[in-house]
Image (cartoon, rainbow, N blue to C red):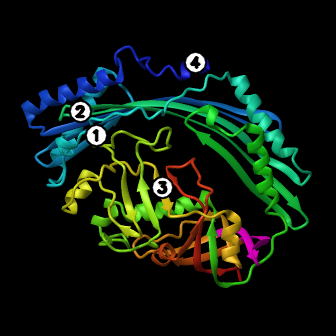
Amino acid sequence: MSTDSLYDLTAPLCEQDGDLPEIASRLIEKARKKGRKIGIDAAEVGISQGAGYTVTVRLGDVETTEFHQDVSCGITVYVNQCKGSANTSDLSIAALDEALDAAFDIARFAQPDSCHGLADASLMATHMPNLDLSSPWGMALDQAAEMALACEDAGRGFDVRIVNSEGASLSSYGGRGVYANTHGFLGRHNGTTHSIGCSLLSEDVRGKHRDYWYTAARRADALDPAVSVGQRAAERCLARLGGETPPTGACPVLFESEVASGLLGSLTSALSGGLLYRHESFLEGALGTRVMPAWLSVLERPHLKGGAASASFDGEGVQTQSKSIIDAGEVVSYLLSSYSARRLSMETTGNAGGVHNLILEPHTTKTRRELLQEMGRGLIVRELMGQGVNLVNGDYSRGVSGFWVENGDIAYPVAEVTIAGNLRDMFLGIVGVGDDLDPRRRVRTGSILIDSMVLATPA
């Protein structure tokens, strides 16, 4: 298979299916006709198609070459406030008809729920800006392997203390899709993502340590050079050598930008409608209350060109809009789909399917040096382990590795320690945000300095 064919996503996957918008429109029309006969109130269809490849190398040899090609279609119907859904990976006419019948059969036996249904027709997206999300990478597989090998070689040759490799990889993927419903809405979306990554092992008399680095972007020309990715992975791996046990007790904690995005991810989860209407969020009833310092805001920017989570419409066809989630430290918006909004007697926020480019925006940012000087003595978190986040009450306890700081300077690396706190106190205790914003993720933030958490070491 050539790399060109991987990105020929306009080609039908079988002789019967046709183009994705045509398939979706045809299926919606069949749902309308079926509805007139058997009482389907509304229907929606989502179809996605994607293709790509991953080349993995290890110790100077190509280890695997994987091709990915997928297609899926989801059909949902609403009958007398009952919901039925069915999925298929076969876009033939017979398979789609069978899926539509299955969705209706499921709805017949489902419990009615007055909150079920499509989002309001007046909210359907009409503005479809060019978000620059699709840029196929026309690279032959032998070139991709050479680039991955160059990445690993740069890391392995960086220092004699780099003693092994878990490999380097290059991935490229392109996808497209449509969403349609019986309001008459039909929206299209497409996108590509490319990445290069490397994972290495270092060793000294105290033991072995692993670390990695990667670059990811919508466009290949926005990626970091492969050689620099390997070198960065080696630098991070070497920095772990010579670890010591830090003192226990309360101390400031600096979350580096690549893990700080996960901290904000806990915030967005706690503000999501699914947890709120189930009474499973520590931020239930938080609208209008301060959860962060007044100099901090959290913004959603769905129309950011080339953004990792940019979209003109959400998973229900609702127009996405730029908005504040946290404004001057106060919660001003939840993250709701039409269903969760109805359960809360509110309106959808256009977040069916998640957030679209969430950005932590401080009044001012600080350099890493400034953050360390403000910290004085404390812990830098580079890697998080475990799943110790309780969104019901906000309790937070994670295994971490990183660095101990004394007098504003890194003193030594640490591993296998635990930090603990409560998310309410942690968000209110943010005292600094770095200028090292990580653009690779749907949640963008610089490093986050928290005034105090409890650090514990193994007994």
Going by the picture, which residue comes out furthest to the front?
364
Q: Is residue 66 left or right of residue 284?
A: right
Q: Residue sitting at 68 percent across and 24 percent down?
A: 141
Q: Are marks 1 and 2 in contact (CB under 8 Å)?
A: yes
Front position among marks 3 and 1: 3
- Tag 3 residue: 359
- Tag 1 residue: 317
Give, as a single range, the part of the protein colored magenta: 400-415
**Kind of residue at badge 1:** Gly
In percent of width and height, residue 211 lies at: 74, 55
Q: Residue sitting at 92 percent across and 51 percent down?
A: 160
Pick whichever of labels 1 and 2 is earlier in the sequence. Answer: 2
Front position among marks 3 and 2: 3
Residue 451 at least partly seen: yes
Pick whichever of labels 3 and 1 is earlier in the sequence. Answer: 1
User: From mark 3 to mark 2, how far is it between C-alphas?
Assistant: 29 Å
- Tag 4 residue: 4
Neighbour tally class for label 4: few under 14, some 14-19, many 20 plus, Cα within 10 Å:
few
- Tag 2 residue: 185
In percent of width and height, residue 95 lies at: 31, 26
Neighbour tally class for label 3: few under 14, some 14-19, many 20 plus, Cα within 10 Å:
many
Q: Is residue 379 rendered magenta in the image?
A: no
Q: Quadrant of residue 157?
A: top right
Q: Is residue 440 left or right of residue 187?
A: right
Quadrant housing the N terminus: top right
